[in-house]
Image (spheres, coloured by chain):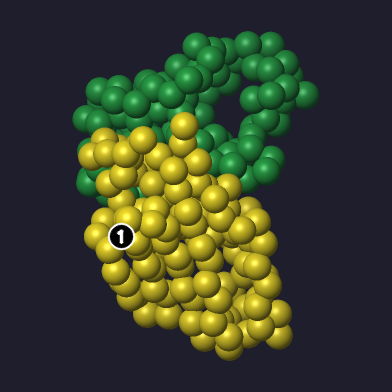
Amino acid sequence: DTAVSQTPKYLVTQMGNDKSIKCEQNLGHDTMYWYKQDSKKFLKIMFSYNNKELIINETVPNRFSPKSPDKAHLNLHINSLELGDSAVYFCASSQDPGNEQYFGPGTRLTVT
Amino acid sequence: GQSLEQPSEVTAVEGAIVQINCTYQTSGFYGLSWYQQHDGGAPTFLSYNALDGLEETGRFSSFLSRSDSYGYLLLQELQMKDSASYFCAVSEDSSYKLIFGSGTRLLVRP
């Protein structure tokens, strides 16, 4: 009974390719997030959706496009991948604003 | 600007008590959260303080002083499994955004 799941867990791809990461939560939460964690473990929010509406859009290159088909799913599509995109990407969800967030297992993206 | 400062690394002995401090400078403040992350794992929620004082949850407690822009996480009766990274995070307002500190790596030794 995974609360927040992501696929794939690992993604290795070449520069210039386009890839997607999928996220699903079965907690009934209204809000979902995408975070990027770099090699120094710094965790930074990228996007947040509340009931399928984009509510947080941090300074992220427009090569990154989130899509929320329904409130249980939040996918991340990345165009024209660059070496600097290599990181672990975490999806998360919460019921209440801000504090208690439930994270997925992460997707380790390696761009070569 | 926004900044959260925490020590990069702390070492303690099994059974001991350790305190991980977090000072913050943000444009607004709504609450302070703590997350634990084991190597290769996902961050997991530990605690949340919106008001001054101490919140206790089992072996873990979290403290907040809004006037000092300061909080800490206190871990008691340390166990080997507590070896992990610990992140403080600030909610600047009632929105859904968390700003994370750079994390404190805790190493528990036998």
Residue A104, visible in the rendered structure: no
Q: Position of residue A100 (x, y in %)?
A: 32, 53
Location of residue A21 in the rendering, given as x and y in whole percent from the top left corner:
51, 29
Q: Nearer the viewer, residue A48 or A8?
A: A48
User: At x 31% / y 51%, what residue is drawn?
Assistant: B31
From the viewer's perspective, tell me whether residue A91 is left or right of residue B9: left
Most extreme residue toward the right, as rendered?
Answer: A112
Q: Quadrant of residue A9?
A: top right
Q: How many marks?
A: 1
Q: Which chain is green?
A: A
Residue B49's place in the image compared with A81, above or below, is: below
Q: Quadrant of the N terminus of chain A?
A: bottom left
Residue pictured at 39% horizontal, 47% vertical: B90
Q: Is disc 1 placed on a helix, strand or loop?
A: strand
User: In the image, what residue type sits under mark 1?
Assistant: Asn
Picture coordinates of residue B52, whole percent (x, y): 28, 63
Residue B1 appears anywhere in the view: yes
Tell me the subunit letter for badge 1.
Answer: B
**Residue at x 23%, y 46% (from the top left corner):** A96
Closer-to-camera residue (A6/A101): A101
Q: Quadrant of residue B57?
A: bottom left
Identify residue for label 1.
B49
Look at the image and give the colour of chain B: yellow
Q: In the figure, B29 relative to A45: above or below? A: below
In this view, the residue farthest toward the front is B67
- Front-most of residues A11 and A81: A81
Q: Residue at x 49, y 76 (%)?
A: B75
The answer to whether residue A17 is above or below residue B48 is above
